[in-house]
Amino acid sequence: MAKLVRQQHLDADVGYHGFGFQESDDGDLPVPFPDDFADEVFLNAFPGRLDIYSAGHTHTASVTVEVWDGPPAAHDRAQWDEQAEADYESISGEVAVWSMSLGRADDVITLADSGGSWRVRVSCTGRAAAARLSEEEGTGHGVEKYLVQFWPHTA
């Protein structure tokens, strides 16, 4: 059974419906965030980068990131508005959080001491409320909630 290695909570600044996770050492990425960001694609993977499309235009999403030593147990899909998986390749073992409007955040997620291949599952709830807040009030804080789970691809 897979074990949780570390867990981190952070706030992600969402702008223009998007935020992402990108290799911390991003100087050699072929497509840096937010180039080629795809609207309406919940989870979009590029080399060294994961884009997340939010239901709200501008707000602060609540994000929990988990790093596992193997595939975590799947959650009941009914409890999530959206859920998707992708492959992720890390050179440094560290991932930075990026905002469409503010650029790189101070938050860094440590996957491992060095690079490697990872699988990631992104789950989200609160999408309808985030969209409604964006249309009616402009912004919200912590309404849209994400669970981002990384585990070694070889596991």
Image (spheres, grey):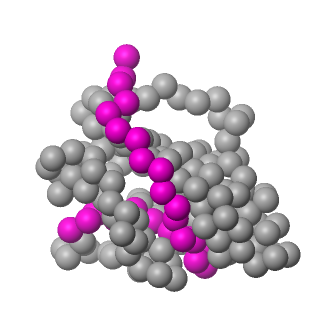
Q: Is residue 33 above or below residue 80?
A: below
**Residue at far right of view:** 136
In-front residue for pair 9/32:
9
Residue drawn at (72%, 74%), measured in percent from left and top? 139
In-front residue for pair 96/50:
96
In-front residue for pair 57/44:
57
Magenta residues, start to end: 1-25
Residue 57 at x, y percent in the picture: 67, 75
Q: Is residue 43 above or below residue 139?
A: above
Residue drawn at (65%, 76%), measured in percent from left and top? 58
Magenta-colored stretch includes residue 23: yes
From the viewer's perspective, tell me whether residue 83 is left or right of residue 68.
right
**Residue at far top of view:** 1
Q: Quadrant of residue 40?
A: bottom right
Residue 30 at x, y percent in the picture: 26, 74
**Residue at far bottom of view:** 101
Q: Quadrant of residue 28?
A: bottom left
Q: Quadrant of residue 106?
A: bottom left
Magenta-colored stretch includes residue 19: yes
Instruction: Give the overall secondary structure of the magenta segment.
Output: strand
Residue 54 at x, y percent in the picture: 62, 64
Residue 33 at x, y percent in the picture: 39, 75
Q: Quadrant of the N terminus?
A: top left
Q: Quadrant of the C terminus?
A: top left
From the viewer's perspective, tell me whether residue 132 is left or right of residue 25.
right
Residue drawn at (53%, 53%), measured in percent from left and top? 63
Is residue 39 visible from the viewing direction of this image?
Answer: no
**Residue at far left of view:** 114
